Image (cartoon, rainbow, N blue to C red):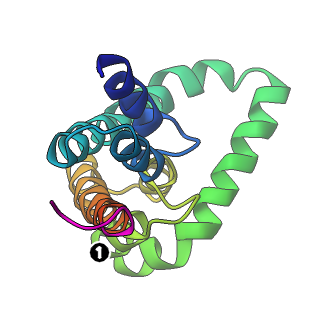
Amino acid sequence: MFLDILIAMLWSISPFGEAKLGIPYALLNDINIYLAFVLCFSANVLVFPIMIFFLDVVNRYFMKWNSYKKAAIFVGRRAKAGAGKNVKKYGFWGLMIFVLIPLPGTGVYAGSIAGYLFGLDRKKAFLANTIGIFFSCVIVWGTTVLAMGGFN
């Protein structure tokens, strides 16, 4: 059980699934439905400070290399294109709604990058990402629980 919890939390931190994959993994491996929600949500929230550290410190250091710079520009353009109109026009609310949508490419990774690129206040960006993650987790969690046969 501990290993399943750890794997679910790692999926929730991973850019390849975030909590959209961590929650279903946890529930399909018989982890308590409430524990799965809390742990996967918490793990997904940890991504924001990690990303901000990466963007502030690591990103600036690696921008010296052309191959990294090209990849960073590509990722930045994708995040800006996905969230750009909403974040630019609606700020906090646009970022929150962007992160809230439980689809690939709309999670906290893209939300953190978009907030960073558009110069949103860090506290507001963190709050928008956290609220968006919460509602995204609720949608994924509720859908998964209902698909598995409902609440016991």
Q: Residue under circle 1?
A: 93
User: Left or right: 64 with respect to 85?
Assistant: right
| Residue in the picture at 49% in, 33% down | 55
| Residue at (25% x, 67% y) in the render | 150
In the picture, which quadrant includes the N terminus? top left
Q: Is residue 100 above or below residue 31?
A: below
Q: Quadrant of residue 90?
A: bottom left
Amino acid type at circle 1 is Trp
Q: Does 43 sit left or right of 85 as displayed?
A: left
Residue 122: x percent and y percent? 27, 47
Magenta segment, which residues? 146-152
Quadrant showing the C terminus: bottom left
Helix, strand or loop status at disc 1 = helix
Q: Quadrant of residue 139?
A: bottom left
* Residue drawn at x 25%, y 42% as measured from the top left: 36
The outermost residue toward the right is: 67
Identify the residue shown where x is 68% and y is 48%: 75
Nearest the viewer among 150 and 126 is 150
Judge by depth and name the residue closer to the eye, 36 or 111.
Answer: 36
The spot of residue 12 in percent (x, y) is: 41, 39
Is 23 rendered above or below residue 118?
Answer: above
Q: Main secondary structure of the magenta part?
A: loop
Q: Is residue 35 above or below residue 107?
A: above
Residue 39: x percent and y percent? 23, 36
Q: Position of residue 136 (x, y in %)?
A: 34, 63
Q: Nearer the viewer, residue 116 or 131?
A: 131
Q: Does residue 97 appear left or right of residue 14 in this picture?
A: left
Q: Is residue 76 magenta?
A: no
